[in-house]
Structure formats: structure tokens, C-alpha cells
Image (cartoon, rainbow, N blue to C red):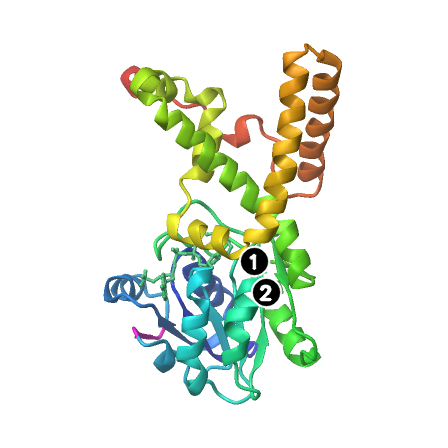
Amino acid sequence: MSEPLFEKIALVGIGLIGSSLARVIAREKLARHVSISTRSPQTLARAQELGLGHSYSTSAAEAVKDADLVIVSVPVGSSGAVAEEIAPALKSGAIVTDVGSTKGSVIAQMSPHMPAHVHFIPGHPLAGTEKSGPDAGFADLFQNRWCIFTPLPGTDPAALAKLSEFWLRCGSNIDTMDPDHHDMVLAIVSHLPHIIAYNIVGTADDLQTVTKSEVIKYSASGFRDFTRLAASDPTMWRDVCLHNKDAILEMLARFSEDLASLQRAIRWGDGEKLFDMFTRTRAVRRSIIDAGQEIDAPDFGRQAMVHPEKQA
Ligand code: NAP
């Protein structure tokens, strides 16, 4: 049997991302020992029931002792407090990384606490679902998804190479970026779509005194696809909005301008403009399919749904 990549990995936070890591680490035998910590006894007990690791603690400092790799998977607004808690317990030479959806803010919160004797390498796996908690994770979550590192100046190349090897063995593709660039890119590909989804579902919900039954009944017409994003974890997304404020506001300003232009085209009956734009956007989906980030099945590959009343 090949040697595991790490002797001990500590997972701080065991929700969707942390528990998916636990599962893929076990499947790929990436560590001899996995220690798990989460702040609530309930989540910790559930992680233990699911057998996600070898040792369990509500103390993050306890969990990271002797760990060669520490992965912080908590909402981005809590990363500073976690860094402060674990700092005194970190082993010399340990790699400390995170999975937070924003990078500038996580670096600003965590790096002041990181001792000089550890390698802090911020990261973000671009993989997720609208579910949260330790039951939601699965070992294939990172398969063929990107993991972006935003290394700080002077990062040890050997530590970065080892962390890259870890994520490759979790199934990911690796990329490296400047943190500000990461935050701008993610604002458009992830944060804005979620904000738009929260907004449209919120608008429909406000209308529901008039149209409640119709909104739900006819949701498959398009609305339903927004509700998946709008069902994402409220804590995580509150923190993303608060911690990537500048990039999100920049993208929202552009979005609003483009929406106003679309509104004008509809008002003035500019069919050519509408047709050209809808043709351009259709090609974007084709490129995503060609890049292997989506399947080409109609209706996102959903099986036809049988209405419960019509089931035999
Ligand atoms: P999750 O399923 O909600 O799990 C969150 C974990 O963090 C739980 O262990 C929770 O502990 C802990 N936690 C919550 N609040 C905390 C606090 N104030 N202090 C310390 N620990 C706290 O979340 P997730 O989806 O795994 O997301 C974790 C991180 O991954 C976030 O930074 C997010 O931005 C990033 N991320 C998420 C996705 C996605 O699609 N979900 C994708 C990529 C990256 P208890 O349950 O014990 O309270």
C-alpha cells in the first residue's frame, strides 16, 4: 500500500465541504489520522456517527495538535476567530489552508494570526451544492472541479506542491491567482448568480399573497432553477456578501446597467438586440459544456417528474 500523503489531517468545520473532504481523504487514503472539530456538540456527534474521522473535539486547538495539514472549512466571517484559536497549537512546518469563498477577507483575517513556523496557503475549491452540514458531503464533490490557490508572497514552493498534490488526489484541477482577481472572478461566476437568485425568489415570495399557488405550481417554467441557488446556506451567503463587498458591488453595478439596457430593448421593441444577446448567451452555455463543467442533458439532466397525484 502506498504511503498516505499526510500523517495527520485536521478538519476544522465539518459541514458540506469539511465532510466531503473527510470522505475523499478516507477513500483515497490521504492521511493516517483525521481529526475533526466543529463548534457544536450536535454536529460533532453527527460527524462521529457518520464515522468521518479518527478523533473528535469541539476544540479546534485540540484537533490541530500534531497535524501536518489543517483545513479550515467554516463560514468566511469566522475564519479570523478560528485562526486565532488554533495558532498557538499549530505544529512547526504544518500547512494551514482554508476553503472560503472569498480570499482577500480570509487572508486579512487569518494571516495576522499565523505563526512564522507554518505554511499558510489560502484556497477555494469551486465545488458545492445548496445543502449544508455533515450529512450533505460526498467524496466526489471535488471531482473535475477547480481548486484555486491564492498564495501569499514568499510561499514555500514545496508546501504549495504538497497541497496541490492533495487537491489533485481529491479529484480537483488546480489554478493559482492573485486574491483580488479571485474575488472579482468569483463575484461574477458565483456571488452574483446567488444574489440574483435570492432576489428573484424573494420577489416571487412577496407576490405570493396574489399568486402563491401559481408560483409553485408553474415553477418548472424557469423559476425552479433559481430556487436551488436561493436555498443555499444563509450564514455562508451572508458572510460572502459582507466579505466580498467591493467586487460584488462592482458586478452589481455592471449588471444593473446591462439590465437597464435589456429593459430599454424590450420597451422599444428592439427584437434584433434581444435576439443577438440571447444568441451570444446560448454560446456561453455551450462553452461550459465543452469545458466539462456541465452535462448536455436537457433540463439539467433531471428525470421527468411524475406528479404525486398521478402516481400509481
Ligand atoms: P456548512 O455545511 O454550513 O458547515 C459549516 C461548518 O462551520 C460547520 O462545521 C459549523 O459548525 C462551522 N461553523 C459555523 N459557524 C461557525 C462559527 N461562527 N465559528 C466556528 N465554526 C463555525 O458550510 P460549508 O458549505 O461546508 O462551507 C464552509 C466554507 O466553505 C465556507 O467558508 C464557504 O464559503 C466555503 N465554500 C462553500 C461552498 C458551498 O457550495 N457550500 C463551496 C465552496 C466553498 P457547527 O455545525 O458545529 O455549528
Give the foreground label among 2 and 1.
1
Closest to the observer: 103 or 286? 103
Residue labelled with disc 2: 167
Query: Type of residue at label 1?
Result: Pro
Residue 125 is marked as 1
Residue 257: x and y in percent read 65, 32
Helix, strand or loop at label 2? It is helix
* N-term mark: 2 or 1: 1
Q: Residue at x 33, y 22 (%)?
A: 208
Q: Residue at x 48, y 87 (%)?
A: 91
Above or below for 277 versus 286: above
Q: Residue at x 50, y 23 (%)?
A: 222
Which stretch did the figure color magenta?
A: 54-58
**As drawn, is 281 to the left or to the right of 25?**
right
Closest to the observer: 305 or 60? 60
Query: Type of residue at label 2?
Result: Trp
Helix, strand or loop at label 1? It is strand
